[in-house]
Image (tube, coloured by chain):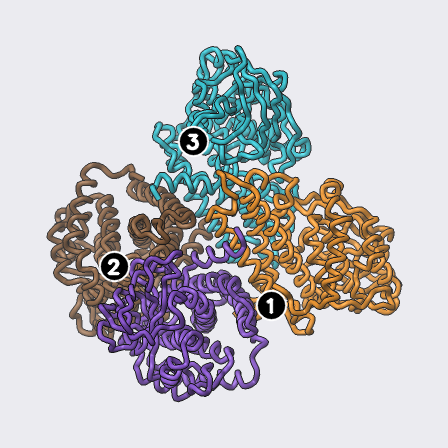
Chain colours: A cyan, B purple, C brown, D orange
Amino acid sequence: MEARFYKEEHRIFRKTFRDFVQKEITPNAEKWENEKGIPRDLWYRMGEQGYLCPWVDEKYGGFDAGFEYSVIIHEELARSEVPGVGGMGVHNDIVVPYIHHQGNQKQKDKYLPGCVSGEVITTIVMTEPEYGSDLANIRTRAVRDGNDYIVNGQKVFITNGITCDLAIVAVRTDPKATPPHKGISILLIEDGTPGFSKGRLLEKTGAHSQDTGELFFEDCRVPRENLLGEEGNGFQYLMYNLQQERLSLTIDAQAMAEYILEKTIDYCKMRNVFGRPVSRFQHNSFKIVEMATEIEIGRTFLNSLIEDFINRKDITLKVSMAKWWITEMVNRIAYHCTQLHGGYGCMKEYFVARAPGDVRFMTIAAGTTEIMKVIIGNMMGL
Amino acid sequence: MEARFYKEEHRIFRKTFRDFVQKEITPNAEKWENEKGIPRDLWYRMGEQGYLCPWVDEKYGGFDAGFEYSVIIHEELARSEVPGVGGMGVHNDIVVPYIHHQGNQKQKDKYLPGCVSGEVITTIVMTEPEYGSDLANIRTRAVRDGNDYIVNGQKVFITNGITCDLAIVAVRTDPKATPPHKGISILLIEDGTPGFSKGRLLEKTGAHSQDTGELFFEDCRVPRENLLGEEGNGFQYLMYNLQQERLSLTIDAQAMAEYILEKTIDYCKMRNVFGRPVSRFQHNSFKIVEMATEIEIGRTFLNSLIEDFINRKDITLKVSMAKWWITEMVNRIAYHCTQLHGGYGCMKEYFVARAPGDVRFMTIAAGTTEIMKVIIGNMMGL
Amino acid sequence: MEAPFFKEEHHIFRKTFREFIRKEITPNAEKWENEKCIPRDLWYRMGEQGYLCPWVEEKYGGFGAGFEYSVILHEEMSRSEVSGIGGMGVHSDIIVPYIHHHGNEKQKSKYLPGCVRGDIITSIVMSEPEAGSDLVKIRTKAVREGSNYVVNGQKVFITNGIRCNLAVVAVKTDPKADPPHKGVSILLIEEGTPGFIKGRLLEKTGAHSQDTAELFFEDCLVPQENLLGEEGMGFHYLMYNLQQERLICSIGAQATAEYVLEKTIEYCRTRTVFGRPVSRFQHNTFKIVEMATEVEIGRAFLNSLIEDFIGGKEITLNVSMAKWWITEMVNRIAYHCTQLHGGYGCMKEYYVARAPGDVRLLTIAAGTTEIMKVIIGNMMGL
Amino acid sequence: MEAPFFKEEHHIFRKTFREFIRKEITPNAEKWENEKCIPRDLWYRMGEQGYLCPWVEEKYGGFGAGFEYSVILHEEMSRSEVSGIGGMGVHSDIIVPYIHHHGNEKQKSKYLPGCVRGDIITSIVMSEPEAGSDLVKIRTKAVREGSNYVVNGQKVFITNGIRCNLAVVAVKTDPKADPPHKGVSILLIEEGTPGFIKGRLLEKTGAHSQDTAELFFEDCLVPQENLLGEEGMGFHYLMYNLQQERLICSIGAQATAEYVLEKTIEYCRTRTVFGRPVSRFQHNTFKIVEMATEVEIGRAFLNSLIEDFIGGKEITLNVSMAKWWITEMVNRIAYHCTQLHGGYGCMKEYYVARAPGDVRLLTIAAGTTEIMKVIIGNMMGL
């Protein structure tokens, strides 16, 4: 069912953007899948059209657009059959907000316009080989040296890791801090900074058109003015922005689930076996009904969550619930929908066949299902 | 599929016993359900026929029968539609073995013949209101006083708690023992011993014909000669006998699952809805097929487990796996089978409708599903 | 989650009614369970307080109250621990609406005031031994004879079957009608009408304080003026009212799930095992978190559904989804919550232990889970 | 669990073959994944060692080895981390048996020796774009013309489709046959036969090193002597050999599940997060325990099934159960094991991360889960 918070202008925007996606993105699915990335040019095209960070203030080139527009962009990109454009969603609503919320005037003036136009592709850099969920213990060191920080360390699983122009990097500025998370700060590190090198493109089991990389910092000199917010507050900023990150990822997962099922229903109505459409077998029809019900229920919950977020309510509990339940749900749906495709369910040319690989990371990234349950359990005082 | 270990004599025995059950037990299901217990006389009848503890040595009145016979008795009793007779299975293969394995000659001579004839109904008494799974910490105290122990404490969830003539009671003889489980001993306490009183019949949510009670000990004097085995070894005896207890309960669960499904298949083939037998709807037929498959798989695993047990192999790991998986399975099966009965699935007169209540305790008694997983996890070194 | 449609007055009403239940209903749970019925007097007490059919217009003695009040009544009654109270909900929002929506002025003024006061207890009489889900197959015949109908047939699974003094009965007035459902009509049959015989109280496996019975009609003479609406329109009326019935059923299931989980969380926080609260074991924490998430998601969906219903939107698709998903969910929750209670999970004195029996009916009554899936599948064109 | 049918010589054989795989196969996993094929030379090496069709009689170059050896080959190949090797298993125990069981002396002596040496790579050619599960619907026509058949049609999902030099092809020799399955025959078509065209390599979502392709037949002239068995018996042969195919498929799925779980347990024991091994978190411990239990139960069932098969018993019912339950089980295990790997669970370099893609086909090929349930349902008379 459509969410209460959409007005006419949102519907028009969705239609326009969906056309854009169908013309400029979906047709290239296979090409970009093989190139393991989306072309730089697409970032400019998106920027021109105002599809990058439309929520940014007008004085930085944005439109001051409401979160509804971000939701629409996420949902339509999720329906593009090109997982790689997810990197744009990350840029739009996960990374750039750091600069906007915690950056100083100088940093905003310097970077935001490029973020909106597509000249500055951003990435958020937290995870390390030894520390995934356990952020408080990251080891990448940033040592003060005059007006610079000298950064040393390694990071993995970085979305836009190959194409990024600006990396927002979690580093440890105080190794002795107790609790350890108080020793974490965030630096803005530009591509090309000496000592900042991009590693290999990581071979994933899905979402191939999304470039995911490793980053290395070897005696990388970063001017102090590139410190985001205050030293030692990094962990707090991460926790703050993580809520919107989880919400964004959940929106992607829900939209994917809806799209996968739509495609599957089309297929099952059209495909005949034993003289009947696949969808006419009671077992299959019940299976589809079960999925449709879970999707409808998930959607209602997500919409009320988005509404809370738009109304500035604290969403930590609900978004943690939605994040694990909906990302697990989309994985179940991808599984059953490939089954309903029979042999074609394993053929790459079918979007639905690729879906299980493309959605697999969702229960792991931005806080695993297990971490979500820990958070909820703590909030419930269990 | 039939287990490898059955010979012709076993098949004959099963047939005879099944007739006995059909004649003497099943017809009384409702009566005993309302009386919340099975008649004393049935114990004698079972004893006469040699259906109580047939494994006991001949010199004590038993038949020295192999475990195969115990399995058959468990399975057929589980198919009797009278959960109460489960108390006889407990007597046969869970309680009496304590006397046989850990009792001294005097105790064996005194009690075993009655256990076989039905004059002595036994019960195992471990759980306390505050200590279910956590046996090592039971509080019922037994203090030495001359040639007696003075026992004080309360016990709950005692099968045969109302009818028992002989209680095998876990007590704490040494409160200072470390680890605490080294302070536990087992006493044989006869009905009628001053200070040993039976509490109310506990109202359960199922298995109504099985009497489950509370026991109280107030300055109850028990002669030292009633100590089972050695002082401080109680916990060890419990752990030893628990393996067979879990195996017995798992056999009951498997046999119940098989019987519930048989009854349901009969019903679904005979009952018509929308002009077709219930079983002819693909969703229902797939549901039944899924249950039949789980039952078949569970049965194969259980048979190989029984075989290991007969061959004196250590079954701790496998029986822990079987116990949780098969008792959870029978609960799933009871749930889906009641669904397949429609409105009659909630009507007491249908055995299948009562099944969910009757099997509910199985995932909890003799070590909960969670305890089983802890045991397995420890054995796997996780 | 706070429902958007509740205003201050609703909260006040809930508070008062909850207080009423705490004082006058919950303490009698066990007594009424054993009496297999709630006392006649309670109907009058409820009537006095305006807790029966508050939605009925004032001219018939009601308050013309909004559906919000019905929601509150059902939610609170579901938290009363007395399953039998459900029969009052059935009276208020499932049966009386038939008279209100399809009755003529004469019938309304004759019956509605009594329904509101509690003098008249109604029951809806559809199911027959051979026709459960399959309503068009009902065989109870009503043959015109002068100014009467002569009714013959048998009905089962009748809520309030023992207490009712007005039965709303589905009958076949035209056995040859094609399509057959056009032969179904509804008669209002008063207790005491010669030939209207109340059969035995049916022994259910749960919801014991709710009187469910068989009814028999043997040459029962019913004046033509007791025909509800038009002849041959009965099936149509049933289908029309089923939507509200399923919504009510979903509301009860959701409120029960919330209550069972609340009680379980309390228990798990206070009960300690192995020296820790039960809720502190990660497996249990996660289990509770999973249930809390499903409850939260179900609630969001149900609230938006109630909102649509109040807004007069067509809810058939979504109420069918809610009916099967929420009633299956409450059964899962009852199962896992009993598990978390350990041995007490099988003891009748614990409400949570009784819950599995009490909620079992929910996936079967008012359209089974399978029927819901058929309806949804048809609406989706599968 | 030790299978009762393995003797000392089998253990020795397993050890040798596992060593061969460790040296010559596993190290090339990534290379061959990218080449989307295993090297032609490996077939010769396997042949030399006697690892292809060891069951073939000595007069055709085989060893007349028991099925135990085939079991070992499949189990160990499933642990090689190279999905493509599966194509060799298909050759050895699924396709070559057709020639052996239904071929005439001339065909056997012509082809079998090459099949054993590895000179001849076979493929079984059934599925068509419009006929997957529904074999009787195949459209590929073979029309008699003098001493030849003229074959026209298209086939898909052909394992070894690129490499094969002998195709065992299901064709329609009598389109008018009634029942239609009586019109199906099987032809042996050699590579290089004019009109036998190999289509493109199909891009799968997993099992990348296994070459799966389309095949086309355009006025392809096949000498009558290449008819396998009798005309019109093709469907019968397919059904006959499907039982062994499904058994093989279950063996591969079971061995894969065991291997994936082993790897995951290693990982969880060594990988630490929040200062503890991943396996020490109770939720993860229980998750692993649940998987270990299902693997153990599946193994017991599979072993007894293999035993029955070796014993020449009819296995249709049980192999159908094993096929769907074990292949669904390995998919669940692949899913949860990737979750336990966190971010690395999406990284191709980890075998476990590739597993979900590699096993996805198993519930679909050789008869989908749904088809298995239909077969079982029919055998149960549902």
Which circle, 3 or 1, is nearer the viewer?
3
Marking on residue D318 = 1
**Residues at marks 1 and 2, CA–CA distance in whole angstroms:** 44 Å
Residues at marks 2 and 3 on the same chain: no
What amino acid is found at the position of numbered circle 2 in the picture? Ser
The relative height of residue B337 versus residue A53 in the rendered view (above or below) is below
Marking on residue C83 = 2
Q: Quadrant of residue C346?
A: bottom left
What amino acid is found at the position of numbered circle 3 in the picture? Gln
Give x and y (percent) for residue C72: 23, 46
Q: Which residue is mark 3?
A: A243
**Residues at marks 3 and 1, CA–CA distance in whole angstroms:** 50 Å
* Residue at 38% in and 30% down: A309
Left or right, D237 with reference to B340: right
Name the quadrant of the N terminus of chain B: bottom right
Image mark 1: chain: D
Left or right, C216 with reference to A247: left
Camera-side residue of C172 and B196:
B196
Left or right, C214 with reference to B373: left
